[in-house]
């Protein structure tokens, strides 16, 4: 070999070495931490995968970073992230999972922008919202952006796929915020516009009950919610919309009114059928007897359904001729079938007045035949008022005994002075007034008037015994026989001066006195205790003076007037009356 040839060979070797050195140096420049490189799988052992990336040393990747490790074979090429050029053992540090994440993120960044639509799958629930998988990248869906309506159970969404709108992408933080609500709102807005452009009054539209309140039902018309007010649900009476509709029910409703500016629609159900109140007065003339069903009860009466959508009111005063009804619920219940008569119709207010008692004979129309004036009756004391007692003659028919008709001899201030509730009494019919449903009775009229024969039993100067029954400021009343009271004036109690009657006499005290005056016409008997202690001769001497003295002051022995005075000034001692709580 010549020197020239040797020289050429040396130069050629030098050039090739230089090229190799330059290529190796260039190769080293391509390997930098954080970059993604392609490597070849050399070996699988001990849950690790040995990968050659063309660097001076190989790298190892944990097997659990491969989702399909069972399908990985030696010689396969795989993209990995170069975490570190060289660790303490001189090995290249690689990551398959981080490379996947970066590639997936780069794919999202390069293919999607904010406001774009993307499909993803709900993978988990976290505080404040949901995590969504979009092409391998985890995105966040805030709870407020899940739907336009509250979700009852968010856990039910895990594993479901949906379309979302990208609200925000933050590359430096690899953060994506999604919204499903914005997408739904946009679609609903488009649907609403189409609906508002085509909807008209009087149309029938299909929808479903979306929400129910006390005042009505919100119906989803596929893009717009309309209000079905409770008053437009039925021609009849309903207390609450749930009586007719439940959430989720499919409904065919009529468009009643449209507010295009506020995008509000009023709906109706009852308008789909004819108004049953049209010509109702011809269908149910006044006086017509019908059978209906009690559908509602109020304190003042019962509402009776005559047909679907038509109800009438039976006032408590029209339920019975004779029964004393305080509340309709005392005699009627919802669901009862009842016979009624139409009393009046108000077409304008759509009201019908009904009566139940008109279906039966009014017992007051024939009461005068059963209880003629002057006849004696026997009844039970049912109730008291301050002015009399009510006596039950038959079921629902009462007669009243006024206090003035209770005794021939005594002034009765309250019926409890002579009668007890529940007691059987005999009385005389004094008056019958069917128009006012009233029968007047007399208790004293059923007995002989003791004053008719009073002069045959008593005479002036006669000594009598009795018991003090009442004490007043002006004197004391003495019962000298059953039903007959006499008056001892304060001036006739004692020869000594008496300042107060109660200082000398008390209720229940037995006394002996002389009769000093009898007035049958005025029903008066006057007594004198101090004359009672006189012997006959002495009384006969003073008799004229005593009688003349009484004539000069008649009110001393005016029994009725004395009673009036006693109760008007309230100075009665002893059997004082307290008002009864049991009043009609």
Image (spheres, helix red, strand yellow):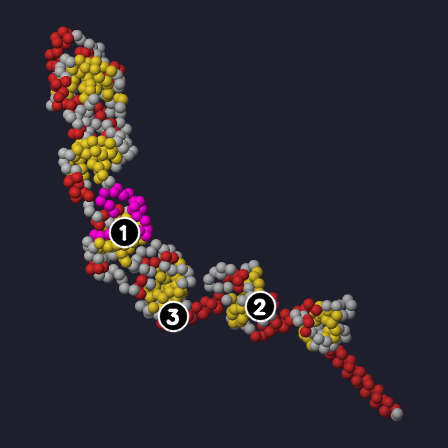
* Contact between labelled residues 2 and 1, with CB atoms less than 8 Å apart: no
Tag 2 near tag 3, CB within 8 Å: no
Residue located 17% across and 35% down the image = 440
What is the secondary structure assignment of the residue under circle 3?
A: helix
Q: Position of residue 176 (x, y in %)?
A: 57, 67
Position of residue 572 relative to residue 291, above or below, is above
- Looking at the rendered image, the disc whose residue lies closer to the viewer, 1 or 2, is 1
Q: Which residues are magenta?
A: 319-343
Q: Magenta residues: mostly which secondary structure?
A: loop
The percent coordinates of residue 308 (x first, y second) are 29, 59
Closer mark to the observer between disc 1 and disc 3:
1
Circle 1: element type: strand
Residue 11 relative to residue 450: left or right: right
Q: Which is more toward the observer, 256 or 371?
A: 371
Instruction: Give left or right: position of 450 versus 209.
Output: left
Comes first in the chain, label 1 or label 3: 3
Residue in the picture at 24% in, 18% down:
468
Q: Residue at x 69, y 74 (%)?
A: 72
Query: Mark number for residue 195?
Result: 3
Residue bearing mark 1: 338
Q: Residues within 10 Å of mark 2 (few under 14, many from 20)?
A: some
Q: Position of residue 570 (x, y in %)?
A: 24, 25
Quadrant holding the C terminus: top left
Q: Secondary structure at mark 2?
A: strand
**Residue 331 included in the magenta stretch of the image:** yes
Distance between mark 1 and mark 3 Cα atoms? 48 Å
Mark 1 is surrounded, within 10 Å at the Cα level, by few (under 14), some (14 to 19) or many (20 or more) other residues, namely: some
Task: Identify which residue, 501 or 402, lies in the foreground.
Answer: 402
Please indicate, yes or no, whether residue 219 appears anywhere in the rendered image: yes
**What is the x, y in percent for residue 297?**
31, 49
Q: Quadrant of residue 2?
A: bottom right
Q: Which residue is mark 2?
A: 133
């Amino acid at each position: 070999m010549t020197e020239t040839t040797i020289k050429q060979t040396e130069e050629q070797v030098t050039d090739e070495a230089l090229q190799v050195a330059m290529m190796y140096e260039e190769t080293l420049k391509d390997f930098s931490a954080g970059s993604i490189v392609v490597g070849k799988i050399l070996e699988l052992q001990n849950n690790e995968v040995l990968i050659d990336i063309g660097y001076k040393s190989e790298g190892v990747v944990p097997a659990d970073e491969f989702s399909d490790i069972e399908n990985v074979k030696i010689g396969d090429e795989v993209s990995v992230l170069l975490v570190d050029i060289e660790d303490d053992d001189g090995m290249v540090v690689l990551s398959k999972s981080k490379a996947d994440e970066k590639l997936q993120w780069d794919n999202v960044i390069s293919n999607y922008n904010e406001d774009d639509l993307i499909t993803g799958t709900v993978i988990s629930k976290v505080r404040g919202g949901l995590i969504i998988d979009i092409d391998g990248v985890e995105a966040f869906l805030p709870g407020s952006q899940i739907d336009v309506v509250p979700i009852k159970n968010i856990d039910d969404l895990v594993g479901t796929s949906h379309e979302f709108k990208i609200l925000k992408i933050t590359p430096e933080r690899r953060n994506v915020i999604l919204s499903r609500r914005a997408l739904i709102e946009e679609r609903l807005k488009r649907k609403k516009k189409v609906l508002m452009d085509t909807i008209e009054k009087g149309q029938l539209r299909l929808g479903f009950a979306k929400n129910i309140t006390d005042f009505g039902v919100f119906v989803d018309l596929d893009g717009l919610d309309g209000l079905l007010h409770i008053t437009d649900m039925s021609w009849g009476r309903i207390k609450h919309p749930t009586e007719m509709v439940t959430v989720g029910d499919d409904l065919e409703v009529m468009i009643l009114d449209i507010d295009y500016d506020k995008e509000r629609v009023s709906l109706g159900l009852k308008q789909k059928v004819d108004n049953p109140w049209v010509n109702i007065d011809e269908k149910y003339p006044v006086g017509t007897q019908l059978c209906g069903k009690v559908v509602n009860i109020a304190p003042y009466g019962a509402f009776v359904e005559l047909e679907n959508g038509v109800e009438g009111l039976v006032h408590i005063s029209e339920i019975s001729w004779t029964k004393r009804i305080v509340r309709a619920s005392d005699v009627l219940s919802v669901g009862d079938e009842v016979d009624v008569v139409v009393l009046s119709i108000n077409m304008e207010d759509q009201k019908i007045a009904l009566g139940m008692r008109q279906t039966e004979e009014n017992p007051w129309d024939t009461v005068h035949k059963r209880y003629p004036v002057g006849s004696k009756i026997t009844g039970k004391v049912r109730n008291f008022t301050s002015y009399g007692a009510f006596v039950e003659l038959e079921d629902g028919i009462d007669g009243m005994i006024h206090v003035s008709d209770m005794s021939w001899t005594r002034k009765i201030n309250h019926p409890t002075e002579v009668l007890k509730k529940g007691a059987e009494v005999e009385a005389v019919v004094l008056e019958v007034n069917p128009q006012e449903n009233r029968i007047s009775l007399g208790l004293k009229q059923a007995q002989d008037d003791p004053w008719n024969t009073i002069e045959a039993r008593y005479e002036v100067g006669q000594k009598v015994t009795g018991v003090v029954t009442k004490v007043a400021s002006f004197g004391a009343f003495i019962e000298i026989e059953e039903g007959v009271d006499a008056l001892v004036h304060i001036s006739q109690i004692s020869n000594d001066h008496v300042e107060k009657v109660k200082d000398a006499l008390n209720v229940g005290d037995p006394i002996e006195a002389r009769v000093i005056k009898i007035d049958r016409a005025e029903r008066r008997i006057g007594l004198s205790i101090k004359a009672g202690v006189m012997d006959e001769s002495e009384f006969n001497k003073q008799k004229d003076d005593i009688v003349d003295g009484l004539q000069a002051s008649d009110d001393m022995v005016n029994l009725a007037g004395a009673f009036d005075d006693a109760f008007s000034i309230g100075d009665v001692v002893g059997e004082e009356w307290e008002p009864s709580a049991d009043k009609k």
